[in-house]
């Protein structure tokens, strides 16, 4: 008799602890039978979905689902029923007001019951989707900028080459000292502008991941004079 009494007290204590755990948990806890009917739920269900615990007890869970999620949910329910375990599955449950909330599940079978824990991840998934959309928009804007720089560089280079070529041809003609000085200024300014256009094109290549580094002999003084010429213009 003493042993039976201790067993009964232990069972009562376990049941009391389980009820306390259900009441204080922030996540949505539930126990369902193998037919998909709710056997026990906590108050978090009422907070998230707006239905009272009394309304949901004994009710099937499938009618609460978004129609597009029923088939996948049934497949995961069958997996749990076959002594399996479900983790990370997300489906949509309908609130009393008609809005759907996305719940992430973890469930495991014990005997003839399935013990499940659900977490409302609606805001988290919405934030992730917004961040992904913002990232795609930023990448598209960056690509558009790179395309614009590349196109602008090519468009400027064509008439610029004509100016530089005409200045070079003009310098081969008889000129007064003043005229030659002006032609030299045109050629110098054209060369400086050409370097700037090349630098802009290089920036677009770098951003597109198409920049190649080449080894070659160069004039250090001329390389330094280029940036200095820009400051003098």
Image: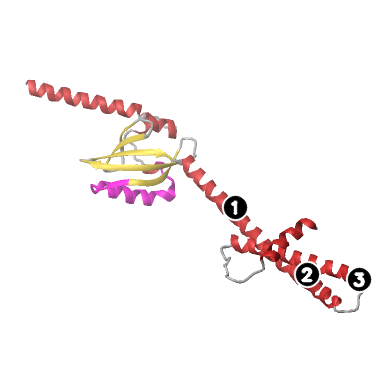
Residue 28 in which image quadrant: top left
Give the extent of the magenta segment.
64-86
The image shows residue 4 at horizontal and vertical percentages of 9, 24
Q: Dot 3: what SS?
A: helix
Judged left or right of residue 45, residue 204 is right
Q: Residue at x 31, y 46 (%)?
A: 86
Give the labeled residue for mark 1: 138
Total number of numbered labels? 3
Q: Which mark is residue 160?
A: 2
Residue 53 in which image quadrant: top left
Q: CA distance from mark 1 to mark 2?
A: 32 Å
Rendered-image quadrant of the N terminus: top left
Give the labeled residue for mark 3: 177
Q: CA distance from mark 2 to mark 3?
A: 24 Å
Q: Is residue 64 above or below residue 163?
A: above
The image shows residue 35 at horizontal and vertical percentages of 28, 43
Q: Dot 1: what SS?
A: helix
Categorize mark 3 by other alpha carbons within 10 Å: few (<14), some (14-19), many (20+): few
């Amino acid at each position: 008799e003493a042993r039976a009494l201790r067993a009964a007290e232990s069972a009562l204590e376990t049941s009391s602890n389980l009820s306390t755990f259900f009441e204080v948990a922030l996540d949505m806890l539930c126990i369902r039978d193998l037919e998909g009917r709710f056997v026990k739920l906590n108050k978090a269900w009422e907070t998230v979905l707006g239905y009272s615990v009394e309304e949901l007890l004994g009710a099937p869970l499938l009618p609460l689902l978004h129609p597009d999620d029923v088939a996948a949910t049934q497949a995961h329910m069958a997996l749990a029923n076959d002594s399996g375990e479900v983790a990370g599955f997300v489906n949509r449950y309908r609130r009393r007001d008609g809005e759907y909330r996305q719940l992430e599940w973890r469930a495991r079978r014990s005997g003839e019951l399935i013990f499940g824990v659900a977490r409302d991840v609606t805001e988290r998934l919405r934030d992730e989707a917004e961040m992904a959309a913002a990232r795609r928009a930023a990448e598209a804007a960056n690509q558009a900028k790179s395309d614009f720089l590349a196109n602008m560089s090519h468009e400027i280079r064509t008439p610029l080459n004509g100016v530089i070529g005409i200045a070079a041809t003009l310098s081969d003609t008889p000129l007064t000292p003043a005229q030659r000085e002006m032609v030299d200024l045109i050629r110098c300014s054209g060369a400086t502008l050409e370097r700037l256009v090349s630098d802009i094109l290089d920036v677009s290549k770098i951003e597109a991941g198409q920049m190649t580094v080449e080894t070659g002999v160069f004039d250090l003084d001329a390389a330094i004079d280029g940036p200095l010429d820009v400051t003098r213009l």
